Image (cartoon, grey):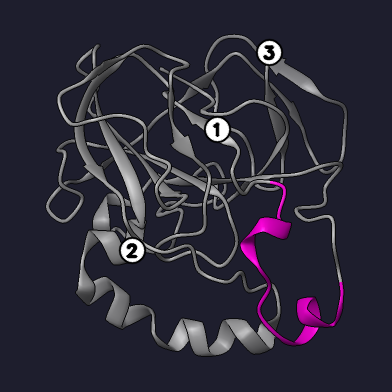
Amino acid sequence: MLALPFRGTWLVRNSPARRVPSHGTDLMATTYAIDFVAVRGRRTAGTRDWRTVLATEPPDRFHAFGLPVLAPAAGRVAAVHDGEVDHEARRSPFAQLPYALTQASRVRAGAGAVAGNHVVLELADGAGFVLLAHLRAGSVRVRQGEAVAAGDVLGECGNSGNSTQPHVHVQVMDAADARVARGLPMAFRGYRALPRTGRATEVPGAGMPGEADVVEPL
């Protein structure tokens, strides 16, 4: 059982409650992965201008960039990767198309090119390994072998790896190496969800947010 790995309000993307595999592939153990994008209201950034429509944008204009990413459960740090750059963000379809055409080359380049800067935790309850990806360059605060408690800061949200705007990617696996692991189902506890339509609901037990829900920890 995981806690949400952040504070504040975040928009759900690629939820496994909508489809499995959630990212359209089982590659890199992403079968049940989920993405979270920080929002104010439902806006992911405070600025919209000509670059939003036609070009790339600096990642620091997005609300998620630089926010703390927290350990979603107690465990031991099984792997750490840092040093990947934070890319320009791409909300524009004109900027996304050439990026999509180079996705295969990033997959061939390995976990760093796909997950960017990331931390893998071996969960203390033996339920598997949780990967938190796309962290900000130079922000990782933990070392391999270190014990962490739920809520400890692991790093900051960034836009490294295979990412078009700053967000936190979470997945659970049966091994520490995503290249050979299988994705495992997961559930979150202790959060409030605001669907696109309807009233906010509290999930104190276990649940999986739906696509386009805005969620926050209780």
- Mark yes or no: residue 147 visible: yes
Looking at the rendered structure, the kind of residue marked 2 is Val
Name which quarter of the figure residue 125 lies in: top left
Structural distance between the alpha carbons of marks 2 and 1? 21 Å
Vertically, is 189 above or below 193?
above
- Can you give x and y, in whole percent of width and height, for residue 9 in the image? 73, 33
Residue at mark 2: 114
Sort mark 3 into few (<14), some (14-19) or many (20+) by Cα contacts within 10 Å.
some
Cα distance between the residues tagged 1 and 3? 17 Å
Quadrant (top left, top right, bottom left, bottom right) of the C terminus: top right
Direction front: furthest residue: 138
Left or right, 179 with reference to 123? left
Lower sequence index among marks 2 and 1: 1
Q: Which residue is drawn at 61% across and 34% down?
A: 209
Left or right, 84 with reference to 143: right
Mark 3: amino acid: Leu
> What label sits on residue 68 in the rendered view?
1
